Amino acid sequence: MKNEMSPVTSVYFVTLLKAYLRGTKTRQEVIDELRSVSPLQQKAGEESNTEVSRLLFQTASEINEHYYQDIVTAISHASDTTPTREGVIHQLEAMLTGYITTEQLIQWATWHNEPDTDDGTGFFDDIAVDYFCTQLLPASAGELAVAHYKQALRIFRSGQHNSLKDKVALVLLSEKERQRFLFYLSDYIQGHTSPEQLDVYLLHKFGMDHHSFPYMSSLSAIMHDPGKLPALLHLAAMDE
């Protein structure tokens, strides 16, 4: 074991772990950095199955036995360990270029989804990132194809800086949700349902009511003209 005069401090490991948790470093990037600090004591093939934070704690403890508690204390009091938009973009880019697997993307995005915890409300600064990590991937990862992940990346890269619209677009990734969108909004613009009845759908699918849904003005502009609804769907889904 190295002594306490090691040039690598516990702060280094805290920073590295935060970068992974926020998404700005992938699992493989963290492992590469750990290898540069100290050889990972893993059996052949074992490293790929070990949770990245465990590898980090193992390496830190080999350098200094006190680092483990230092890291735990720092992370438990930190407010900047939440997945970020920058992190989602970085992880999606890495997955789509083959640098990490889809399973590793999902493992990163859902690390905080422990049983008996809340759904992340108030935990994320960005509701689109919140939805992607706490709802979309846990519920629908098995249904998402490469095209869906590419579209998700396009949504997160959008320059409109409107997380409400980004969340709507993420919900509309699947064809099933697009058909529901057309069905419920068509009923509304044809006068078959009231705003309060529309809220049942909006709240269930988007977590918004007709006051906060970002396309209500567009919807009002096409009242009694359902033929224009597909164009609104393409706008809301951020199709190319």
Image: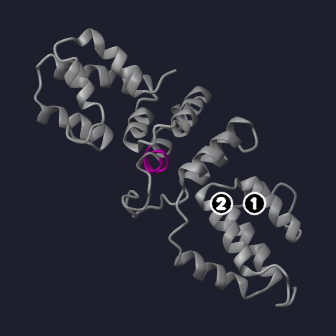
Q: Are marks 1 and 2 in contact (CB under 8 Å)?
A: yes
> In percent of the image, x 82 and y 90: which residue is there?
4
Q: Label 1 crowding class (10 Å Cα cut-off): few <14, some 14-19, many 20+? A: many
Residue 80: give x, y in percent of width and height: 54, 67
Q: Nearer the viewer, residue 172 or 189?
A: 189
The percent position of residue 97, horizontal first and vertical second, equals 74, 36
Relative to the observer, which residue lies in front, 116 or 238?
238
Tell me the residue that label 2 is attached to.
20
Amino acid type, mark 2: Tyr
Asked whether, in this view, residue 224 is left or right of residue 50, the answer is left
Label at residue 30: 1
As drawn, the residue found furthest toward the bottom would be 4
Q: In which quarter of the image is residue 216?
A: top left
The magenta region covers 129-135
Q: Residue at x 79, y 73 (%)?
A: 59
**Residue 146 or residue 195, whichever sits in front:** 195
